[in-house]
Amino acid sequence: MSYSEIGSSTPVHDGYSKVTGALLYTGDLQKPGTLHMKFLLSPRAHCRILSFDLSEAEKVPGVRKIYTCFSTPSRLYNSAKRFDGHDIVEDESLFPRTLRFKGDFAAAVAADSPEAAAKAVRLIRMETEDLPAVFSLDDALKPGAPAANDAVLGSNRIADITVGYGEPESELARASKVYEDVKETPAIHHLALEPHTVLAKYRERRKLVIQSSTQNSFGVRLLLSELLDMPRSRIQVIKPAMGGAFGAKIPMILEPYAAVAALELGAPVRIELTRKEVFLCTRTRHASKTRIRTSVSRDGKILAQEIDYLINAGAYCTQSVNVAAAAAHKAVKLYRIPHFRITATPVYTNLPVAGAMRGYGSPQLYFAVQTHLKRIADDLGMDFVAFQKQNLIHPDSTEPVYGSPIGNPRPLDCVRTGEELFGWEEKSRSVPPEGFLRGSGMAVGMHGNGVFKVHVDFTGIHIKLNEDGTLVFFTGSHDMGNGSVTLQKMILAEELKIPAEKMEAIETDTDSCPWNLGDFASRGVFVSAQAARKSALLMKDLLLNEAVLYWESRDWPCQPGELALGKELILQTGTDRSVSLQELLLFIYQVRQFSPEVTGSHANEADRTSYGAHFAEVEICRKTGDLRITDYAAVHDVGKVLNRMGIEGQLEGAIQISTGFALCEEMVFDEMGALKNGNLKKYRTIDAATMPRKIRMAFIEEGDEPGPYGAKSIGECSVVPGAPAIANAVASALGCYPDRLPVSKEWIIEKLKEKDLFLGDPEEDVTGV
């Protein structure tokens, strides 16, 4: 089919406001008489609070209230709860009596200015009793290890999620050769440009209004309702413009503190974390340790595989069970393996809390799987692309645990297209410049679309047409800069033939917008965009039915099937009759006397998966150990491209995240659990100058119902194959296999020296700071 809007390149709808500085983020919002809150953070990795001395802190001019575990509710909750009935470990409280990591909230001060609040925090005296702490996955799982969090479970092993089929254990036991690897990834940070910020006010002592940079406004409302024992009709959560999130803004973190203070003090309360606090007090990507055992046939067919996947939850559970379960259940949808089992285990430690980050457990797991399979293919003397082709699922494959259809999975097309786009065969024969090593690598990854089968999974969109033919729609989608609201405008323009510039979006206000689960799990296209399309079709039906009545009023009888929408027109097909949209709307308002409004919802009832294949070429300087990515190609199975500019931007951003994960990003902790690099100066990231020199991309558009126009998401899938593709390129260049991320300059120099390939001065420190 041909479309007027779908498939075009459309800039984000608020782009002009962003680049001119006119767009207001949560941090820009100011209310008269606003109070400011600052936190006292735990100085210990694990300790019990014995007492507070607040006397000096309370003397600071402007201090209104100091909150501690002795003056606030102790009710347990889970900050990532999403809907009523959500079965999830509840082990958090506002100010716990037992502090469980360096950065845990010990106390808070509300004051007239941020300076007064910060000064008072420094004057709080807290007496504590140290408790034993554990930081690594291995230490946490040792027999007799101290409990990092005994609030609910009393065990560091939060859950064991096992997914599998066949008899992998017996197949591996009788295999002539079993390949085994242990792979590790560190905690990394989301590093959204906008820090976590919230503004709470208690309007007319009746309505609690929360303005927050959140991905989960209805979840925040639910949690506040339960914690504060308030009906949801008296809680309004609004998301202003958001400057990035990547999963870190799904859970409720700051909102309850601002809410409690606003309710008690009767004034607006504002919290904005510093960058150091964002590193410590929000969420991280889970550190992981993965043990894989695989047997293969001589011609490279995978026969059996067992995976033990450990993830470091940090001090509180939050989303860790969900992350582990999601990664485990997705793992069965990539390869055709007769015997398979994965056990995913989230583990408590006394480190900062881990949670959702773009990819939701898959980037860590697929680094392990893809680098492990690369080593197997090399040992068999097989080209890795050929190995992938032999084992990947086919379009007619079914999910092997339950036998349910996967839809129209196209990982094979991704590999074949990427192989040609990248020039895989030619790259294998290329000669590096003198003094350099060169290698090419590739990897395949996947991710789901929505949370069907696991959680409630629907989005609602409300549309209203004004008398002049303009349109206002109300969406619970949380645009994080990724263009989800822009896409919804495109869909409404496609179906209703109304220009997008005549539309306005009311975005993410729990009082006016229909319910939405939240923006995560790659729901933006597959669920929320389909809700926009369904709402548009309802409005289309309304307009066509009203047009029949309009023509009848002029003695021009017709049927809805004879009518069609044109550009701001309703046409009677086969005739020259038409009515402008504005004229019809005046008829509706003045003659029919009602407001043309519709609400449509889409409940996801399909388990669909997006796939991608990434290819990378690297060059390594033998004198300095410096690595540069000289060529990069990425191909994704997305069903249908809806906004070409948007999807290309999503993929480019994902390559940046993946490159940082592969080469430099890591949260480094000392032996006492303190974060050593929790600022932008010390935390290494990838900038524009260190991005791949050349990036090419392509999209497989074979359609996958019931996505809108056959579309699937790319958002999270796009970060899964990148890091292992780069790591495999390094392995090809050096002839050794990275078992841990990041593949740092220090590690490269160490391997160059081991292989007697280093050309620099062995005594000179070339690793940098």
Image (cartoon, rainbow, N blue to C red):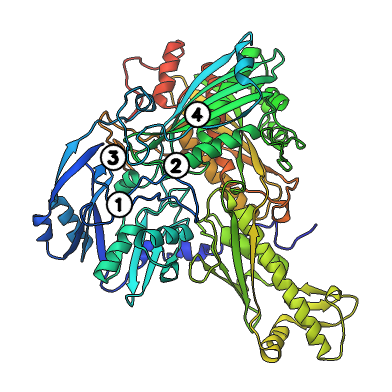
Residue shown at 75% from the left, 81% from the top = 546
Q: Are marks 2 and 1 in contact (CB under 8 Å)?
A: no
Seen in the image, is 237 located left or right of residue 558? left
Question: Could you give the CA–CA distance between mark 4 and mark 1, rounded to whole angstroms?
Answer: 33 Å
Whichever of callouts 2 and 1 sits on the residue coming sooner in the sequence is: 1
Q: What separation in Å lies between label 3 and label 2 (alpha carbons)?
A: 34 Å
**Residue found at x 68% / y 68%:** 536
Residue 398, position as x, y percentages in the image: 73, 36
Lower sequence index among marks 3 and 1: 3
Quickly name the residue at label 2.
Answer: 687
Q: What residue is shown at x 46% (from left), y 19% (from top)?
A: 622
Mark 4 burial class by Cα count in 10 Å: few <14, some 14-19, many 20+ = many
The kind of residue tagged 4 is Tyr
Query: What's the CA distance linking mark 4 and mark 3?
Result: 24 Å
Cα–Cα span, label 2 and label 1: 22 Å
**SS for tag 3?**
loop
Q: Secondary structure at mark 2?
A: loop
Label 4 sits on residue? 309
Camera-side mark, 2 or 4: 4
Question: Within the image, what quadrant is residue 110 found in?
Answer: bottom left
The quadrant of the rendering that contains the N terminus is bottom right
Q: Earlier in the sequence, mark 3 or mark 2?
A: 3
- Residue 8 is situated, as x and y percent measured from the top left of the image, at 68, 57
The x and y percentages for residue 600 are 65, 66
753, 503: nearer the viewer: 503
Packing grade of label 1 (10 A; few <14, some 14-19, many >=20) is: some
Q: Earlier in the sequence, mark 2 or mark 4?
A: 4
Amino acid type, residue under disc 3 in the picture: Arg
Q: Amino acid at mark 1?
A: Thr
Which residue is identified by label 3? 100
Would you name the residue on which mark 1 appears?
274
| Residue 721 shows in the view | no
